[in-house]
Image (cartoon, helix red, strand yellow):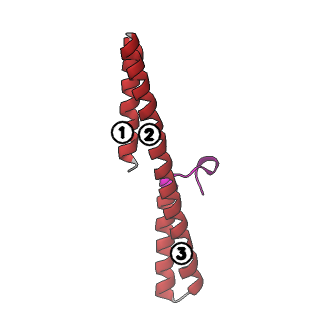
Amino acid sequence: MSGNGNEPNKTSGQFHSLKGTVNEAIGNVTGLQSWQQSGKEEHAQGEAEYQAAQAKGYTEGTVDRLGGKKDAVVGAVTGDRQQEASGNVRHDKGQTQQDFNS
């Protein structure tokens, strides 16, 4: 996978998916099997990378959402308004990240 330090990356995945589609189309037009095959492979790798990045982002959002909820509840129970507010912000950030990656 491309991206930073072998981490899946949505942008890189989209790029390779599109590039693979273009190469496959060139292979289809010219009749060059090698272009068709390499295009199909690059497209598939790009799609896999995009989906892996999406799953990773959703998981990170879940962790933030649950951790934020815990902090908000503990803050509310103990009367620590700063912890409660911080937990609510982290929960909302996690929810947004989950929505973006679902």
- Mark 3 vs mark 2, CA separation in Å: 33 Å
- Assess whether mark 2 and mark 3 are in contact (beta carbons under 8 angstroms): no
The magenta region covers 1-12
The amino acid type found where label 1 is placed reads: Thr
CA gap between label 3 and label 1 equals 34 Å
Res 29 label: none
Residue sticking out furthest to the top = 79
Q: Residue at x 53, y 75 (%)?
A: 39
Tag 1 secondary structure = helix
Q: Position of residue 56 (x, y in %)?
A: 50, 47
Q: Quarter of the image holding residue 38?
A: bottom right
Is residue 3 covered in magenta? yes
Q: Is residue 37 visible?
A: yes
Between residues 59 and 38, which one lies in front from this camera angle?
Answer: 59
Report whether residue 86 is seen. no
Q: Are marks 2 and 1 in contact (CB under 8 Å)?
A: yes
Q: Is residue 51 above or below residue 96?
A: below
Is there CB contact under 8 Å for labels 3 and 1? no
The residue identified by callout 3 is 39
Q: Along the polypeptide, which appears first: circle 3 or circle 1?
A: 3
Q: What residue would you read off at disc 1?
A: 96
Q: Nearer the viewer, mark 3 or mark 1?
A: 1
Distance of mark 2 from mark 1, alpha carbons?
A: 7 Å
From the image, tell me which residue sits under label 2: 61
Query: Which residue occupies 49% across, 80% down?
Result: 26
Residue 33 as seen in the image, left or right of residue 86: right
Q: Which residue occupies 43% across, 26% down?
A: 70
Mark 1 neighbour density, 10 Å: few (under 14) some (14–19) many (20 or more): some
Against 96, is 24 above or below? below
